[in-house]
Image (cartoon, rainbow, N blue to C red):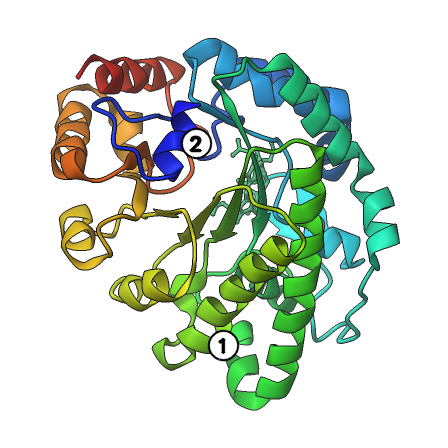
Amino acid sequence: MKFINTLKGENTKVPPIWIMRQAGRYLPEYRNIRQTADNFIAFCLDSEKASEVTLQPIRRYGFDAAIIFSDILLVPWAMKRNVQFIPGTGPKLVTYAENPEIYQPDSVELETLYAPISKAIALTREKLDAETALIGFSGAPWTLLTYMVEGGSSRDFAESRQLIYSDLKQCRYIIDVLVEQIVGFLAIQAKAGADVLMLFDSWSGAVPAEFRTELVIAPHKKIIESLRQQNIHQPVIAFPKGLGEGLIAYTNAVDIDAVALDHMTDIGWAHSNIRPELTFQGNIDPLSLVAGGQQMRNSIDSVLDIMQDRPHIFNLGHGVVPHTPPEHVAELVDYVRAR
Ligand code: CP3
């Protein structure tokens, strides 16, 4: 598999390509199936539907990797944080202030709770061809902590940052519990047939710099070490979004197979400052894809030129947004592959 070879350090002229949130609302065929389920969690836990929407972008664009359709909030869901998705508002959970008791399902309970995801992975792996990788994923501890503490999405993560200063012991405890829950979630996906694992730390940029080692680097290290101890050897892609200059310390410390760069990171700077054998994934702005045309081709060229002497997986710097014209995605894939 070209995708796996690139994660192992091979540099090909045409990079493998997929896009974050490639299964989603910008696709009419996704919206059609989404309509048949009223509740988003139930949709994620419907193995046939989850598998079908995972395959939709592969049929349309022939990406080098599929990402199993589920959500990072399934970990707090398993921890009984009353996860709901409110149309037009986004996720809503019970907040830490409302319920500071942290429930931890054990491995037996996790097997039962996540059985539909295992089934979706097995079904999908069976239908994908041998050249297309299947990615399983989880949120990372800090990002999941923010949803659990704030009770949903947040602009400034004030409650989560406040917890660091007012009760660091409790903050550490929640992170430790999440490390175990995330390892459980990823291990189940690996055993079900995921070829690659990805860790989304979408809000790691909100961690104050002096706490990065403790709240981002150390927990990520522990997750990967625990997986390896359990004989789970799938390559890992990490997305520590918003770390900026912190990426240097992060990539020196964490034994990942690729780092996904956000679009705020200058990929030339990253190439000069991050260990040269590490595979990069990324990183054009999702809004460049919305606009399409010559400026998008310029953005692509600039990334590909800089990535000539480094193993690279082409992607966006964050998820594709719902108002993206599907034909622009086709143009992106064609343009990258025609180089
Ligand atoms: O195609 C894929 O990438 C696979 C599926 C996937 C989803 N969410 C499906 C989804 C993945 C990998 C995620 C990850 C995820 N979920 C992240 C990390 C990546 C990132 O973008 O930073 C985060 C922070 C979440 C949390 C989450 N899930 C939010 C904030 C929302 C609401 C967004 C909104 O605009 O309403 C979701 C819901 C969600 N997860 C949707 C999809 C396709 C949209 C909901 C719908 O279809 O009704």
From this view, report whether residue 215 is shown above or below residue 240. below
Tag 2 secondary structure: helix
Q: What residue is rendered at 39% in x and 76% in y?
A: 208
Residue labelled with disc 2: 4
206 sits left or right of 227 in the view: left
The amino acid type found where label 2 is placed reads Ile
Name the residue type under label 1. Arg
Q: Which residue is mark 1?
A: 161
**Residue projecting furthest to the top:** 59
135 shown above or below 13: below
For disc 1, the neighbor class at 10 Å (few under 14, some 14 to 19, many from 20) is: some
Q: In the structure shown, which secondary structural element does the residue marked by tag 1 occupy?
A: helix
Q: Quadrant of ligand 1?
A: top right
Q: Quadrant of the C terminus?
A: top left
Can you give x and y, in whole percent of width and height, for residue 145 in the image?
60, 65
1 or 2: tag closer to the N-terminus: 2
Residue sticking out furthest to the bottom: 166
